[in-house]
Amino acid sequence: MYTAIQNVYSKTFNYFHKTHAYLTKNPRLFLVRKLARFEVLRNGIHYLFKNQKESEEISQFNHYFFENIDLDIINSSLKENGYYSGLNLPQYIVQEILEFAESNICYGNRDPKLYFYLSNKKQAEISNGKQFIVGSYLHNIEKCPAINKMKTEPGLLAIAAKFLEARPVHIASELVWSFPVSTEWIEQLNLAQVFHYDIDDYKFLKFFFYLTNVDMFNGPHVCIRGSHKNKKFLHQLIGLRCANLDDKKIVDYYGAENLVNFYGPAGFGFVEDPFCFHKGTPPTDKARLFLQLEFAINNYKDIRSFK
């Protein structure tokens, strides 16, 4: 009984301590995370940020990575399904990013203290006494010229502008390996390998690109079609804490027939409304290298804070 009371006290204290830190360090992001979980509120607030004129101007850009982009079809699919697949990177860009990944330091489990080169991953795991479930390039990604080009690629900006109905702002990128290792649920929770949705602005979107071949054994990204809208009220109420719910309960509510697994060769890409429930599945065969680019209307700086 005493232990149970201690646990409740500890959780309550941590909640209020975290909330205080959140309010003092990034109050705008705090407000977004509290309000944007509710569909009616985020739609209303998004209306205030809309700038159709800027959106249309950007939509006229020429596309130099992606050919035959139909902005209306992509936007319609994003609105209806929460995703669109079929954006394929040129192979020379895939090769440039792979060469960058092989020759630069990445960080085990996104921990800046656990740095290693891909070629000496096993030695680094032994010396640190930890298995690496993922390896992210964190801030080192800024050294990759090919990825820096993609932040301003006209085709991506045009898709983002059409969807956001405003001038898109690049707010985050990540290049990350997922390794085929056995994991516990808590590890999957901490590394976004359980169903969740993101709240990084009132409207935003993410582009994903595979840099290695991905099939059912190599950690495909999964989303639940249509779950970006008409969410169960409980799922809106608890927001980011939906990640603590059992995956099966989420799938049962939105329907197993709406599960979408993204498979494709190196270079295959798709764009997603991150208010959709989604997750990265742990690979069981080969490691997967994945690039993510995120665009929004507003930039709240450190969007990974206080999740």
Image (spheres, helix red, strand yellow):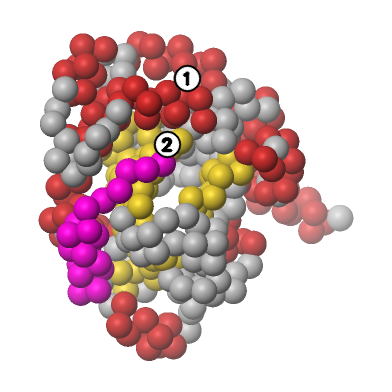
**Residue 112: horizontal and vertical position, in percent?**
33, 66
Between 32 and 291, the one nearer to me in the picture: 291
Estimate the x, y position of residue 274 in percent, counting from the top left: 46, 37
Mark 1: few/some/many CA within 10 Å (<14, 14-19, 20+): some
Helix, strand or loop under label 1: helix
Instruction: Depth check: give the residue in front, 62 or 49.
Output: 62
Name the residue located 16 percent from the left edge and 49 percent from the top edge.
148
Tag 2: Cα neighbours inside 10 Å, few (<14), some, or many (≥20)? many
Q: How far apart are the alpha carbons under marks 1 and 2? A: 22 Å
Residue extending farthest to the right is 1
Relative placement, left or right, of 101 versus 14 is left
Q: Which residues are magenta?
A: 85-104
Circle number at residue 84: 2
Q: Is residue 283 left or right of residue 8?
A: left
The disc, 1 or 2, on the residue closer to the chain's N-terminal end is: 1
Q: Is residue 284 above or below residue 36?
A: below
Residue nearest the observer in this picture, 16 or 253: 253
Q: Quadrant of the N terminus?
A: bottom right
Q: Which residue is mark 1?
A: 42
Q: Measuring from the top left, give residue 172's x and y in whole percent.
A: 30, 44
Residue 101 covered by magenta stretch: yes
Q: Quadrant of residue 257?
A: top right
Name the amino acid type tagged 1: Arg
Image quadrant assignment for residue 305? top left
